[in-house]
Image: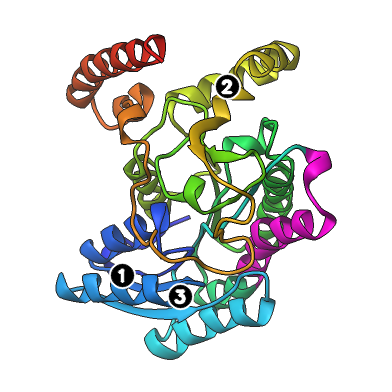
């Protein structure tokens, strides 16, 4: 299965106005790809396209709510209308409700599933006819380590990620059976420092957070760029994510015990936030059209991801990680 170099690709990035999607669009455009960016945030897309154009890249924006198949199909249709084809579809759009399961309404649970699971399925449905016509290409779907291990306060989000992995596994083998050389990749990040935790709806009384340590969004972007050129089935991003995957397979009960100890308080900040605060569950919100979130001080390097890129970087990563963990632990001890 041969995929084109990114410099020769037409790439679609869904969920591109902020976070990993925004970083991916910028870096793909820098490498010479023609980029189509989509999300609900028209303002975020406008600033992204402007930034790409200022750097000499080529991009168009297609505002869309991924919970509506017709809007997702329009992303694919406008891509082919503008550029004549599609080579890679990257799907990142997601939302969440941070609350105990019994405090999530049926409508809220349904909405998370519509965006995170049905939206991903709609993306694949919209892209596949065009990729099949080209005779090759890549479907790259960003799930989460919560597709392997659910967390408290995130029942709807975790459910959507489990379901997503299920349909991708079925789709992948169907395409192989039919003889289509289309790569289907599931990328599972750990906790990434993006505006995700600012935008989700919370019923915890405070602004939510991922369980530290955090990792830089560029690690996931690098994985996406790799998968756009190299067929790969599953890609776990972050040391903690890979360790969690191993322990979950060996002893789910041990993971239960660890999460009982750290996951409830560990997902709460000290910043008061009501459930009526602006959130992106049903509509986009302003002010977060950027790559980074608010947790840069909790970021550490990922040794395994750095080792994958070469031994020289690995030595630097080990040193930086040791320093980062020391600072993180010192900060936690002083709280």
Q: In terms of image quadrants, where is residue 126? A: bottom right
Label 2: how many Cα within 10 Å (few below 14, some 14–19, many 20+): some
Number of the front mark, 3 or 1: 1
Q: Position of residue 226 (x, y in %)?
A: 37, 47
Q: How far apart are the two marked residues, 1 and 2, measured between alpha carbons?
A: 34 Å
Is any part of residue 5 visible from this angle? yes
Q: Is residue 80 left or right of residue 248?
A: left
Say which quadrant the C terminus sits in. Answer: top left
Q: Position of residue 218 (x, y in %)?
A: 32, 44
Q: Residue furthest bottom?
A: 81
Which numbered disc flags the more N-terminal residue, 3 or 1?
A: 1
Mark 3 = which residue?
Answer: 86
Tell me if residue 133 is in the magenta stretch: no
Number of the front mark, 1 or 2: 1
Label 1: how many Cα within 10 Å (few below 14, some 14–19, many 20+): many
Nearest the eye: 236 or 228: 236
Judging from the image, what secondary structure is the residue with disc 2 in? helix
32 is higher (above) or lower (below) than 72: above
Number of the front mark, 3 or 2: 2
Label 3: how many Cα within 10 Å (few below 14, some 14–19, many 20+): many
Mark 1 = which residue?
Answer: 48
Q: What secondary structure is the stretch in magenta mostly built from?
A: helix
Which numbered disc flags the more N-terminal residue, 1 or 2?
A: 1
- Image label count: 3
Magenta stretch: give its range.
Answer: 101-125
Mark 2 = which residue?
Answer: 244
The residue shown at (23%, 19%) is 320
Q: How far apart are the two marked residues, 3 and 1, measured between alpha carbons?
A: 20 Å
Q: In terms of image quadrants, where is residue 261? A: top right
Which numbered disc flags the more N-terminal residue, 3 or 2?
A: 3
Q: Is residue 289 left or right of residue 78?
A: left
Tell me if residue 121 is in the magenta stretch: yes
């Amino acid at each position: 299965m041969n995929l084109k170099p990114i410099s020769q690709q037409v790439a679609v990035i869904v969920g591109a106005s902020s976070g990993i999607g925004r970083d991916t669009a910028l870096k793909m455009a820098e490498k010479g790809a023609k980029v189509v960016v989509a999300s609900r945030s028209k303002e975020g897309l406008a600033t992204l396209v402007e930034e790409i154009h200022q750097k000499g890249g080529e991009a168009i924006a297609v505002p869309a709510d991924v919970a509506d198949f017709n809007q997702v199909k329009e992303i694919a249709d406008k891509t082919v209308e503008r550029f004549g084809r599609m080579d890679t579809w990257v799907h990142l759009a997601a939302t969440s409700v941070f609350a105990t399961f019994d405090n999530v309404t049926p409508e809220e649970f349904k909405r998370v599933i519509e965006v995170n699971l049905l939206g991903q399925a709609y993306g694949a449905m919209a892209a596949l006819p065009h990729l099949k016509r080209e005779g090759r290409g890549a479907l790259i779907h960003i799930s989460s380590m919560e597709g392997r291990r659910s967390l408290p306060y995130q029942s709807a989000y975790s459910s959507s990620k489990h379901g997503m992995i299920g349909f991708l596994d079925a789709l992948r083998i169907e395409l192989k059976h039919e003889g289509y050389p289309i790569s289907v990749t599931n990328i599972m990040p750990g906790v990434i420092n993006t505006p995700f935790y600012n935008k989700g709806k919370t019923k915890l009384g405070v602004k939510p957070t991922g369980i530290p340590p955090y990792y830089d969004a560029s690690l996931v972007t690098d994985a996406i760029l790799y998968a756009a050129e190299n067929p790969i089935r599953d890609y776990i991003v972050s040391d903690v994510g890979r360790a969690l995957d191993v322990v979950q397979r060996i002893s789910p009960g041990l993971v239960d015990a660890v999460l009982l100890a750290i996951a409830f308080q560990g997902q709460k900040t000290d910043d008061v936030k009501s459930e009526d605060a602006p959130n992106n569950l049903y509509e986009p919100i302003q002010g977060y059209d950027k790559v980074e979130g608010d947790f840069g001080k909790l970021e550490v390097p990922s040794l395994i991801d750095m080792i994958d890129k070469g031994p020289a970087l690995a030595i630097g990563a080990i040193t930086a990680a040791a320093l980062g963990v020391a600072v993180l632990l010192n900060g936690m001890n002083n709280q």
